[in-house]
Image: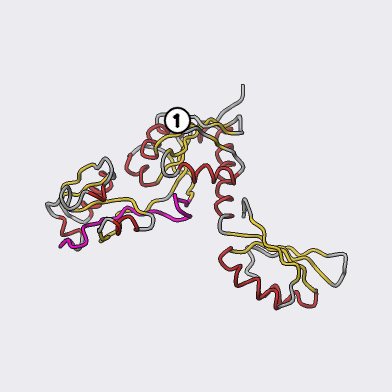
Amino acid sequence: MTKKLKIGLPKGSLQESTFELFKKAGWNVKSSSRSYYPAVDDDELEIMLIRAQEMARYVESNVLDCGLSGSDWVQESGCRVRTVADLVYAKQGLRKVRWVLAVPEDSKIKSAKDLKGKRIATELVKTTEKYLKAKKVKAKVEFSWGATEAKPPELADAIVELTETGSSIKANHLKIIDTVLESNTVVIANPACLDDPWKKEKLNNLILLLQGALVAETKVGLKMNVLKSRLREILNILPALQTPTIAELSNSDWVDVDTVVDESVVRDLIPKLKRAGAKGIVEYPLNKVIA
């Protein structure tokens, strides 16, 4: 019988970006709109879609061996699970997200200390209460079932809400006055999983490739032909991940240079390489970069 690692993936806003990350890491995950058990091209994986808010509970109770959730929801749950890796990606990009304290644009509330006796709506109740306690402020924190940004000023004086770019906060005529918590996707596991040598190795291999896929998101490969007489000049231009690979060509006067660079610098880098004498410059995408 094939051994299996039972893993939970986040259902909801992170689902599609998680599936895409797994694909780049080497696993094709497919799910119908109504299915909670996606198919995956790996007989050693058993996947279940779970809301990030509930992931830690099911990992703690050994229903799942491990799962991907937000560090915010792991903290909020209070569950005894182990965070074994960070995967910094969100719905719209490779960044952390923030839980922010926000109030109406015309509110007289300027900081947390002005919340004394006020009502705060949020899904992140325990963490918000902890934040207020640290600020020595007594306020009423109410659980919000959704549409939190629409509740001020009639239903709440302030909100603590998740934001990636801040655009939805502004669109609802709110202003951010503080950051309560920063969060990113994490891999969590229970002790039983980590004490099982096969499951631990399977999970570590999965994490290695997922992290490699994330690194590759911001990198590209560059290949070019360079005259040996111009090699030093070219190497001085290249910002290499490590030492570039240099290979001899059939023409002994030339070498092939192969390296990995940040995608953000390529548009400025290629013209400089061309002017320095590089020929046959090829930019190519990467699926994974393992340091």
| Drawn side of residue 41 relative to residue 180, left or right | right
| Drawn side of residue 85 relative to residue 147, left or right | right
Name the residue: 71% across, 78% down: 276
Please tell me whether the stretch drawn in magenta is mainly helix, strand or loop: loop
| Location of residue 76 (image quadrant) | top left
On the image, the x and y values in percent for residue 228 come to 80, 74
Magenta-span inclusion, residue 104: yes
Is residue 69 placed above or below 259 in the rendered structure?
above
Front position in the image: 241 or 217 = 217
How many numbered discs? 1
Name the residue: 43% across, 38% down: 11
Amino acid type at circle 1 is Arg
Q: Which residue range is magenta in the image?
A: 88-109
On the image, the x and y values in percent for residue 118 come to 14, 52
| Location of residue 147 (image quadrant) | top left
What residue did someone put label 1 on? 34
On the image, the x and y values in percent for residue 260 come to 65, 61
Q: Is mark 1 on a helix, strand or loop?
A: loop
| Drawn side of residue 269 relative to residue 31, left or right | right
| Drawn side of residue 99 relative to residue 193, left or right | left
| Location of residue 134 (image quadrant) | bottom left
Q: Quadrant of the N terminus?
A: top right
Name the residue: 56% across, 28% down: 4
The residue at the far top in this view is 1
Name the residue: 40% across, 31% down: 58
Magenta-span inclusion, residue 138: no
On the image, the x and y values in percent for residue 212 come to 58, 50
Q: Quadrant of the C terminus?
A: bottom right
